[in-house]
Image (cartoon, grey):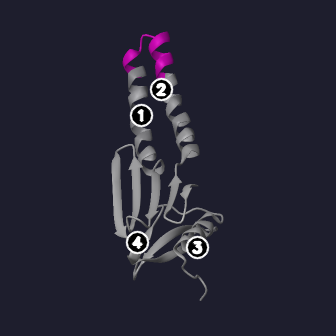
Amino acid sequence: MKVTHHTDDLLVVDNKPWLIAVILLGFLLVPVWGGIKVITETALTGFGIGMIVAGGLFMLPFFWGFVRRTQMVLDRQAGTVTIRRRTIFGYGQEEHALDDLRGAEVETDHGGSNRTHRMVLRFGDETKPFLKSYASGERAERLAELVNGWLGVSTEA
């Protein structure tokens, strides 16, 4: 996650999961490489093509689920909060009025042996997650502090 623009009028935060994309690509290349080896070194061309297609189809849901570029734009001049999500299958965008944004909070999942967190934006009684997934560490807390600081919202109870 990276803050790509931080001024008084504009805050842009990008999440590009490069590491998970590279790891999944590595898993995809194994059946592709195996299929190419089978095609070039044996008479089992159909089996090699099947390995390539099956490997690609097997990895497709993982790319869709885990490789998702997310961008949050808080724009004072336009008066908007925009959350953009891009996957290999398409693009989605949510836009809200900046005046409706009450602040950012950290949502914690207590399931399993580890606590994981994500930052959510609070619009009145409704919350919208910046990222769909939870993660360990303090990244969500730091991001919520950044957003609240940019908004000038006090987080004291």
- The amino acid type found where label 3 is placed reads Gly
Residue 135's disc number: none
Q: Which mark is first along the chain, 2 or 1?
A: 2
Q: Which mark is first along the chain, 4 or 3?
A: 4
Which dot, 1 or 3, sits closer to the camera? 3
Q: CA distance from mark 3 to mark 4?
A: 14 Å
Which dot, 2 or 4, sits closer to the camera? 4
Which dot, 4 or 1, sits closer to the camera? 4
Q: Are marks 2 and 4 in contact (CB under 8 Å)?
A: no
Helix or strand or loop: what does disc 3 sit on? Answer: helix
> Is residue 25 shown in magenta?
no
Residue under pointer 2 = 32
Which dot, 3 or 2, sits closer to the camera? 3
Helix or strand or loop: what does disc 4 sit on? Answer: helix
Magenta stretch in the rendered image = 35-47
Residue under pointer 4 = 98
Quarter placement of the N terminus: bottom right
Outermost residue toward the bottom?
Answer: 157
Residue 155 position by quadrant: bottom right
Quarter placement of the C terminus: bottom right
Q: Residue at x 42, y 34 (%)?
A: 56
Q: Are marks 4 and 1 in contact (CB under 8 Å)?
A: no
- The amino acid type found where label 4 is placed reads Leu
Q: CA distance from mark 1 to mark 2?
A: 8 Å
Q: Residues within 10 Å of mark 2 (few under 14, many from 20)?
A: many
Q: Position of residue 100 (x, y in %)?
A: 38, 77
